[in-house]
Image (cartoon, helix red, strand yellow):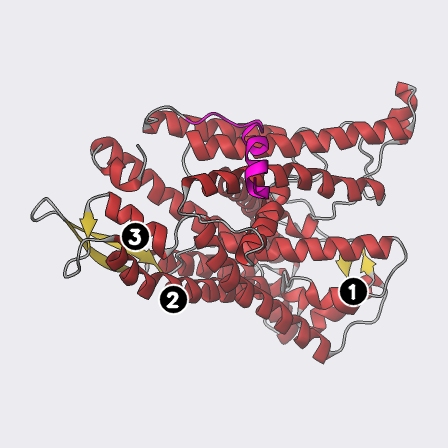
Amino acid sequence: MSFKESLEPFFNRLPAVSSPEGHVHFKNKLLWTLGILMLYFALANVPLFGLSSESIDLFDQYRAFFAGASGTLMLLGIGPIVTASIVLQLLTGADIIKLDMSDPRDQAFFQGAQKFLVFIMIVLTALPQIVGGYIQPDASIAASLGVGLGVLTFLIFLQICLGGVLILFMDEIVSKWGIGSGVGLFIVAGVSQQIVTGLINWVPDQSGLPAGIIPKWLYIIQNVGADYLFSGDGFMFILIQGGILALITTVAIFFLVVYAESTRIEIPLAHSSVKGARGRFPVKLIYASVLPMILVRALQANIQLIGLMLAGRGITIFGEYSGSTPINGVMYYLAPINSPYDWIPSLVQETYTGYGVAAPELWQIGLHVFVDAFMLIAGGIIFALFWIETTGMGAKPTAQKVFNSGMQIPGFRRNIGSIEKVMERYIPRVTIIGGALIGALTLVASLLGTIGGAGGTGLLLAVSIVYRLYEDIASEQMMEMHPMMRSFFGKE
């Protein structure tokens, strides 16, 4: 018996959300999706019992695409799910685990292995934060309960793990009973909340100005003189601190992503037994979606977590930190760019003055931008290729779906090999181009900043997921009206 065969029975016994036995009507799918979304918002507002206000959120910079909320049951967000996906995709991509994703048995094994890895990652993500002292118990609560700090720390750990398990099964419910994926839904919820907050929040930020763009403009109009605003320094002030650049970037990225999502190559199809029945198979420019960008940023987040843990133990060979932000060493170059404050020299100087340390040299800032650009573009390509192979979107499984639906490519013999040969011409090339493009767009959005600090990655993910959710809803409605379409999409 092989190692894979010995693990299959164990993976099959893991707790799982049961799949629907038949077709789930569109209204029911919509209700399940909205219900899980409401539950997510509710859990994201349930504070961890016994948590001290002095605790540090290690993933604060990555919160836009890790979803969840600091200090709540949703502290881990989708981090364990994404990290497990990275590990498994790297193992299958390097052929350490040999799987044929067109085989339903191997697909089931992949899903079981991923779920098992998620359980492990929940513990491995929560434990270092507890042991490292970043998640701290509240001494006054421990005293009032008459228990030691160790007991309260253990209770906090259990709550964090419970939240991680809940978000895993919430994602599974949406995937099986709802529309789209739970991971995408939670990202959109978190980013949308940040953007709305970034528009209307009147609470002052570190600069003393209201954090929201609209209250900030009202404050500037009332309190800042016109002679300063029309000077060189005033222009930079209104552009950066005033949020004009972030607003322009947010709107521009929205339209660019919608345009990229709607750009596609259409492969003509004809039905083998019904004359005149024709269709087209669309290969989108962003064929693998923007979800591989989560994997790139999650990889960076886990690298930073290792550096932070080492620095907390006094090992600063890879870099020193101010809070959860690397300020020098290798970790500085591997950290993601989030806003103009990370690369415009005068703003970098201003930031590092707040840290009380010397700012990096110009060449160091340039190298930081180059490394982030390389990780986004190269990582976008690599993870996009891994993504299509592990999710059944590659040329071979796509050809199988087209063949099973009774369709064929006009001018070619009706067999899987002919269809696969045509798909091989387009799918890998478009995937590479799309992965590089989405990486470049993420870089631009990260350099210029976005409303509410959602970040370039978070904004791109939210816009793309909402667009695809719109397409999924349209597809579901079409299949409700035309049940024969379900066989082509493999829904029944």
> Label 1 near label 3: C-beta < 8 Å?
no
* Residue at position x 41%, y 44% in the image: 103
Residue type highlighted by circle 3:
Ala
Q: Nearer the viewer, mark 3 or mark 1?
A: 3
Q: Nearer the viewer, residue 433 or 438?
A: 433
Element marked by disc 1: loop
> Label 2 near label 3: C-beta < 8 Å?
no
Q: Which mark is residue 399?
A: 3
Residue type highlighted by circle 2:
Arg
The segment highlighted magenta reads 1-19
Which residue matches tag 1? Answer: 327
Which residue matches tag 2? Answer: 429
Q: Earlier in the sequence, mark 2 or mark 1?
A: 1
Residue type highlighted by circle 1:
Ile
Q: Earlier in the sequence, mark 3 or mark 2?
A: 3
Q: Nearer the viewer, residue 390 or 264?
A: 390
Whether residue 60 is situated above or below residue 325 in the rendered picture: above
Element marked by disc 2: helix
Element marked by disc 3: helix
Q: Nearer the viewer, residue 306 or 77?
A: 306
